């Protein structure tokens, strides 16, 4: 049974406990605060862009062939896609600065581990 537990923890990962205290060094605490704020902002922006894209698609479907409504829906979808692309660029730049330039300990971006089944 231990083997099964080890395999599932490798597949699903481990849960990190939340930060329970503010680090004693002010620069580390400030860096962690700024990093968390930027990550929250990026998450909210991504969610907003997806909703905006979804609403544009609904407008397109409900336009009923009217040229003005269709153009407005196309513009909304275009704006949402451009916003998502800008967000991806911002996230990439943020990750490069966070990991490579500032060398924040424990920081990693875009690292994915594919699950494997070992015999």
Image: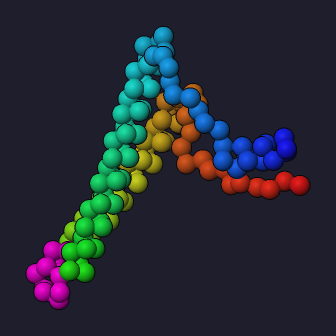
Figure disc tally: 0
Locate residue 67 relative to residue 50 in the image: left or right.
left
For image coordinates 23% across by 78% down, the residue present is: 60
The image position of residue 41, as x and y in percent, is 33, 41
Q: Main secondary structure of the magenta part?
A: helix
Nearer to us in this view, 38 or 62: 62
The image position of residue 8, as x and y in percent, is 73, 47
Q: Specify whether residue 17 is painted magenta.
A: no
In which quadrant of the rendered image does the N terminus lie? top right
Q: Specify whether residue 68 is painted magenta.
A: yes
In which quadrant of the rendered image does the C terminus lie? bottom right
Can residue 74 be seen here? The reply is no
Looking at the image, the residue that sits furthest to the top is: 24
For image coordinates 29% across by 66% down, the residue present is: 53
Which region is colored magenta? Answer: 63-74
Nearer to us in this view, 101 or 26: 26
Nearer to us in this view, 5 or 75: 5
Nearer to us in this view, 95 or 72: 72
For image coordinates 40% across by 53% down, the residue present is: 89
Locate residue 82 relative to residue 99 in the image: left or right.
left
Can residue 31 be seen here? The reply is yes
The image position of residue 29, as x and y in percent, is 44, 19
Examine the image and state in which quarter residue 116 appears: bottom right
């Amino acid at each position: 049974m231990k083997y099964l537990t080890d395999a599932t923890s490798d597949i699903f990962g481990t849960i990190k406990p939340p930060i329970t205290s503010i680090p004693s060094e002010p620069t580390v605490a400030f860096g962690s605060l700024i990093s968390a704020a930027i990550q929250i902002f990026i998450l909210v922006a991504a969610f907003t862009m997806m909703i905006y894209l979804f609403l544009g698609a609904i407008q397109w479907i409900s336009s009923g062939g009217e040229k003005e409504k269709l153009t407005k829906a196309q513009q909304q979808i275009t704006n949402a896609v451009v916003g998502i692309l800008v967000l991806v660029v911002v996230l990439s730049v943020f990750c490069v600065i966070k990991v490579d330039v500032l060398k924040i300990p424990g920081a990693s971006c875009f690292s994915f581990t594919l699950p494997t089944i070992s015999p």
